[in-house]
Image (cartoon, rainbow, N blue to C red):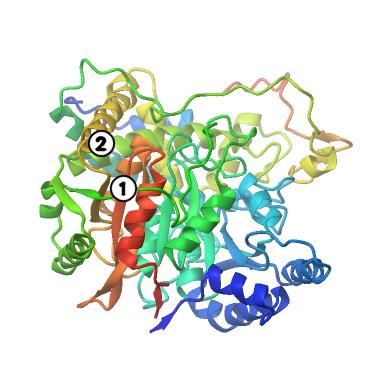
Amino acid sequence: MTSARTIQTIVNEQHAGTSTACDEVERSLQHIDRVNADVQAFREVYADEARQAAERIDADRAAGHSPGALAGVPIAIKDNIVSRHGTSTASSRMLEGYVSPFDATVVQRLEAAGAIIIGRTHCDEFAMGSSGEHGAFGRARNPWNTEHVPGGSSSGSAAAVASGCVSAALGSDTGGSIRQPAAFCGIVGFKPSYGRVSRSGLVAFGSSLDQIGPMTASVDDAAQLYAVIAGVDPDDATTAAHDVEDVTSAATLPTQLRVGMSSAHLDAITDNDVRRTVDAARDRMAEAGASFVDVTLPPPDISIATYYLIATAEASSNLARYDGIRYGRRAALTDDASLEALYAASRSEGFGDEVRRRILVGTFVLSAGYADQYYGKALKARRWIAACYERAFSSCDVILGPTTPTPAFRFGERPDPVEMYQCDVFTVDANIAGLCAMSVPMGVHENANLPVGVQLTAAPFAEPTLFAAARVLTANEPVSLP
Amino acid sequence: MSESPINRDLIPHLARLARLRIDEQEAERLHDEMARILAFVSALDAIDLDDLEPLPRPANVVNRLHDDEAGTPLALGDLTRNAPAIEDRFVAVPKVIGSGDSS
């Protein structure tokens, strides 16, 4: 095992003059060349554009201009984040060949800070999936063992970081899509509080749940990336207007961290190695002087039910925009075909199985006669879940638990969609209630020889506490690569 | 959620609403999956939610409106580049008026 190369290292080397942005881009491109055939993290690589951007950054630095916080750092983006680089498809045939007329706010902010977008990573189609198996153009593999899934839906972003192609990538998280693949691939994955990072330019799945966030090789790298992408954006009316909290190690914090744990959640872990990993994390926090309280969290089956009702309802509504008219796939029909026939044919050709399934479920839970009974009920359960967390955070600063019930499984091992939905059992609450949460790697599963992550969760906008707890757990060491 | 709404007509009905074409084989598979999905979401029956207000988005979200100022629009060419069919500056669509098809 080797230690990952961090953003901090890259920035320091270029500052000291021992490396350049051009060197860094070449290093990344060569590594991608070596491993991508096997790991299949990247759907598109922007070699020429990245080299040009690196030359500009090096020239700027040579001319004495102050480089940005991420100057010369290659970064990968998930395929559901639009940019004018290449084609933005959300890994769906529906958007095959789509050239975005604008850059997502997060891409604008990364590039303004000097980061170099090196490529675009495979994901589950429209970010719907927990394994990376539902992308239309390829399936990223777990760099620790390529017979295993990298997790999803930010599958390629996790694989790109864990295979050492890049130090950092952006993912998006609707029910665990940053944290679960981060745990499966042994990297840091951070879902910010809802409203902290602009969703402008994120292909919408569940608009009240989606957040973009960093997937990185260290906790400090996640903090650095977050500081660049977070903050109010006129193009996303749901971004919070108050100043972004300081998440650097200099932030002021409670002197003693109060850590909440749910014995009911812990008892629900059936995998002994996962349980041991959570225990190890607890011990490490105890050594650092943390105190522990038992907290009552929503029962897992309530969380999953609430999540799937809300997520499918919002997905069916958001995906109604794909009609084959102004952009996206249009079916080739005869001239006398009706508009209605064109909609249905285009949508049926463009969407894959998992997306169709979720659209139908979402259509059902919003349909006349059932909306109150299903969607309406889920929104009440959402308030109930949010209240559970409010109560929990009145007695603790951060909650510690597993990120996933098991380590990464094999491709094809979970063909049943309902069983697959259970992968998200520990991650969906943060999206339902708008909390911030992070998965940090805590060693390797003894039986499977695959990484295991633990999850830290904090109240909305309590990112400083979340990062402080994560630094305790990881001692801020870079993650290990396979 | 006690009474199952699943019947043979449900999937074709939903497919029509969602503008999706579903063949019989897929409809049958989806019928079974839908039944199982609705069974697992019935977990919500176990908690008393009657007195709670719905929460459509996280509680901390305040919807902001921005000032009514003209911005720079995206270039027309950048927008129409992605249209599947263009005639002149316009997106071409099938004949809508007088086609006699209202399905």
Residue type at the position of mark 2? Tyr
Residue appearing at x 32%, y 22% in the figure: A376
Residue type at the position of mark 1? Thr
Mark sitting on residue A457 = 1
Which residue is situated farthest in the right direction here? B88
Count of marks overlaid on the render: 2
Mark sitting on residue A203 = none
On the same chain, marks 2 and 1? The answer is yes
Residue for badge 2: A389
Between the residue at mark 2 and the residue at mark 1, the CA separation in whole angstroms equals 10 Å
Residue appearing at x 25%, y 29% in the figure: A387
Tell me the quarter of the picture where residue A77 sits: bottom right
Q: In the rendered structure, the residue with mark 2 lies on which chain?
A: A
Residue A254 visible in the picture: yes
Residue appearing at x 74%, y 45% in the figure: A101
Mark 2 or mark 1: whose residue is earlier in sequence: 2
Badge 1 local density, few (<14 within 10 Å), some, or many (20+)? many
Badge 2 local density, few (<14 within 10 Å), some, or many (20+)? many
Looking at the picture, how far across and down is residue A118, in whole percent?
Answer: 65, 67
Q: In the rendered structure, the residue with mark 1 lies on which chain?
A: A
Drawn side of residue A79 relative to residue A332, left or right: left
Drawn side of residue A421 relative to residue A343, left or right: left
Front-most of residues B86 and A293: A293
Drawn side of residue A42 relative to residue A298, left or right: right
Residue A417 visible in the picture: no
Q: Are marks 2 and 1 in contact (CB under 8 Å)?
A: yes
Residue A354 drawn above or below residue A122: above
Residue B79 drawn above or below residue B98: below
